[in-house]
Amino acid sequence: MADMQRVIDLAQVGLRAGWTQAKVRAALLAHLERERRYLERRQRSGTRTSYDEQTETDQIVLALAICFLAEEGTAS
């Protein structure tokens, strides 16, 4: 589990750099797409590691985070 202070520090860096909710959603979508391409490449090569399993779980987490941010953005 990530150290919460590290998460807060990174978030502050993003806020100071001018990251908005829309920019965060776009970056998460791009990351989700990169991971999808990675998993497809691994599947085509017939190789699999524990990192692939973690990446599959991360895909779900990223998708949920994107949806939650989208919902919050439409409520405000």
Image: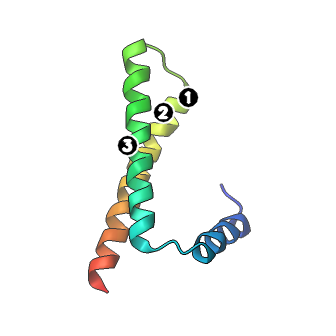
Type of amino acid at the residue the image marks with label 2? Glu
Residue lying at the far left in this picture: please name it.
Answer: 74
- Report the front residue among 17 and 21: 17
Disc 3 and disc 1 in contact, CB within 8 angstroms: no
Answer with mark 3 or mark 2, whichever residue precedes in sequence.
3
- Please tell me whether mark 3 sits on a helix, a strand or a loop: helix
Answer with mark 3 or mark 1, whichever residue precedes in sequence.
3
Task: Using the image, determine if residue 33 lies above or below residue 44.
Answer: below
Eye-nearest disc, 3 or 1? 3
Type of amino acid at the residue the image marks with label 1? Ser
Pointer 3 local density, CA inside 10 Å: few below 14, some 14–19, many at least 20: few
In the picture, the disc for residue 5 is none
- Please tell me whether mark 2 sits on a helix, a strand or a loop: helix
CA distance separating discs 3 and 1: 20 Å
Screen quadrant of the N terminus: bottom right
Eye-nearest disc, 3 or 2? 3
Q: Position of residue 50 (x, y in %)?
A: 55, 28
The residue that mark 3 highlights is 33
- Report the front residue among 68 and 73: 73
Render colour scheme: rainbow
- In this picture, residue 40 sits left or right of residue 19: left
In the picture, the disc for residue 50 is 1
Question: Looking at the rendering, which quadrant does residue 22 occupy?
Answer: bottom left
- Report the front residue among 64 and 15: 15
In the picture, the disc for residue 53 is 2
Type of amino acid at the residue the image marks with label 3? Glu
